[in-house]
Image (cartoon, coloured by chain):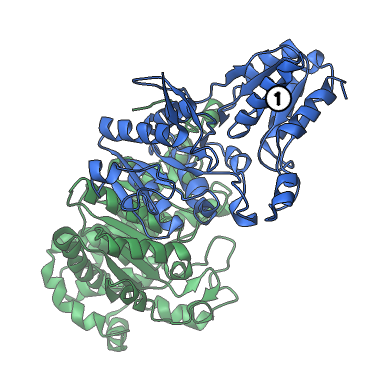
Chain colours: A blue, B green
Amino acid sequence: MAVVTYRDALTQALREELQRDDRVFLMGEEVAQYNGAYKVSKGLLDEFGPMRIVDTPITELGFAGVGVGAAMVGLRPIVEFMTWNFALLAIDEVVNAAAKMLYMSGGQYKMPMVFRGPNGAALQLGAQHSQAWESWLAHIPGLKVCTPGTPADAKGLLKSAIRDDNPVVFLEGEMLYNTKGEVPEGEHIVPIGVADLKREGDHCSVITHGKMALVAMRVADDLAKEGINIDVVDLRTVRPIDVDAIARSVQKTNRAVVLEEGWEICGMGSQVVDFIQRECFDDLDAPVLRVHQEDVPMPYAKNLERAAKPDAGKTVAAIKKVMYLD
Amino acid sequence: MSTEAKQQPPAQKRKEKGTPSDNGADAASAKDLAGTTPEVRRELLHSMLLQRRFEERCAEAYALGKIGGFCHLYIGQEAISTGVMSMIRPDDYVITAYRDHGQALARGISPRAVMAELFGRDAGTSGGKGGSMHIFDAKTNFLGGHGIVGGHVPIAAGVGFAIKYRRGNQLCICFFGEAAVNIGAFHEALNLASLWDLPVIFIIENNRYGMGTAISRSTANEDVLIRAKGYRMEGESVDGQDVFAVRECMARAVERARKEKRPTLIEMRTYRFMGHSMSDAVSGTYRTKDELEENMKRDPVLVLHNKMYESGELTEGDMHKIDDEAKAIAQDAWDFADASPEPPLEKLYTDVYTDTSS
């Protein structure tokens, strides 16, 4: 298998799907001439031309709506937000239009489109540029929400998202674009809604998604040296959520830590814990703990930012606590 | 308005004609009457009367609890829907806001299906899942009924984008009220439509009130058309109570969309004869009864009726016949909707997602 970056894996997915279906087009700020703010669309303008790789003004609400309209009449838009923080200006088109069109129209108008871009904190970008939006978006019936953490999942899920006839929210990570991993050669598809057991162990389950999957794998590798073996359940998509995969793991380990990048209140972890208490009540040997961003806007100062973010140390501490080892 | 009001004696109509209109549009359009055949004029009258009679029944059904939620009536604005739809092709697209019943009927959507949707029944346009504000009909390229002011205006630009992408020569009509010109979505959509040469006709139905707020209290420059200039777009203001003026203006905009692939912004000056929604009394607290009555003298149905009557092509007997037909269709729609079953409970969970992929 070839080792490629998360960025290149996404570019491969875009290129392959643009080649496969001429109804697919990419639209967003700086996607064409600039090659993408994060270079995910590098080279695509040259290959596909300006009608399919479309530079937009800074007008999130406008071009998100253009994507919705184009999808309504049969095109398959990929709308890139330079970051999901900017997508808040366009959220009416995502939530009130794309997510509900099929239902409001009694099944008459499908929304085959993808809204994609980086999500979550990078380094010292401050409060307005460092936020994880998945729990907001996963709240909405009608949307699917993908949160790939590895290059292989990024490629396989993006291809599924582009082919899906529903509106798919695709959350990438600025800190992930340069990470590397093996990606299968040739056609590689990851189905939406299927979790992946990224590490196997029977002492504790760590249930996570997105960028935090990398943290969880690192923690698993470190703890293995201490003789603690954990399951890492990478949800990969947070709507739909693979409840069966969560239940299988927790029923095996009897302990769980839920790790996410976002805030605590109404976070993805709240939902996962709810599934666990419903599906695995009699299996639990300890209360489920959560690891998440501290309940503050993201600070700028390096030390404060580090303290605010969920990390390996906090995850290890939570695992040891549910194992009554602390 | 009542049938009686439409059958006022000629003296009343002469007085009406002598009243200075907004910009002499009545005089201008008298010549345009010749541009249509008597058959077309009858169709226009029938379309407008159907909307009127249908919505009168909507108000009645609402009072009886057969229609719930929000229900925004179009009465007073029918020359716009009828005039616009009469100038476009079946393969063109139409998207609108929540005051959508009249436009749906003028586009040719089944009155039965629209009424069934309002009644929340399985045979409705969206199987009862949409309601008054969300009429959709794929067969006539009617892209909805949207409930967030201005939210659908960028969607219209997207439809225009798709037409351009496929090198088609259709166009997209986008209706919205004058209050939408103050919302960001309107501006973002107009900029993109002009920047990218998209075949979209943006129609401001200026009925002078955004809910209960007069345009003078909401809009720094009441000349809403000036916003076209800000986006290097052609614009035109027209008497929206005169179906011929609407058609004439549309002819230019349609030509521009099809041949030059350029968008147009049109202000159609009109007036809403009913409240904003069913919870709002007809004249409300924000406009006077005198103002309402003054505007009702330029009822669009009356304006068309008078022209046809004066030209000698329409007798009162003809008028009765057309009106009776409209009433019969509205009654049939009511009967159909009333007899239609509610959506089965298992449909609660359908249409959230489609299980298809490409």
B89 left or right of B184?
A: left
Image quarter in which the N terminus of chain A is found: top left
Image quarter in which the C terminus of chain A is found: top right
Q: With respect to residue A68, does B277 lie above or below?
A: below
Query: Which one is nearer the viewer's eye here, B52 or B231?
Result: B231
Give me the residue at 57% from left, 51% from top.
B69
Q: Can the viewer see residue B320 in this picture?
A: no
Instruction: Give the percent coordinates (x, y) of residue B141.
Output: 30, 46
Query: Which residue is under mark 1?
Result: A275
A175 left or right of A306?
A: left
Give me the residue at 48% from left, 81% from top.
B220
Callout 1: SS: helix
B21 left or right of A110?
A: left
How busy is the neighbourhood of tag 1: few (under 14 within 10 Å), some, or many (20 plus)? some
Q: Chain of mark 1?
A: A
Q: Can the viewer see residue A120 in this picture?
A: yes
B102 left or right of B33?
A: right
Instruction: Give the percent coordinates (x, y) of residue A56.
Output: 36, 56
Query: Which one is nearer the viewer's eye here, A3 or B262?
Result: A3
Q: Amino acid at mark 1?
A: Phe
Instruction: Give the percent coordinates (x, y) of residue A153.
Output: 48, 26
Give me the residue at 35% from left, 65% from top.
B190
Query: Which one is nearer the viewer's eye here, A297 or B72?
Result: A297
Total residue callouts: 1
Snapshot quadrant of residue B231: bottom left
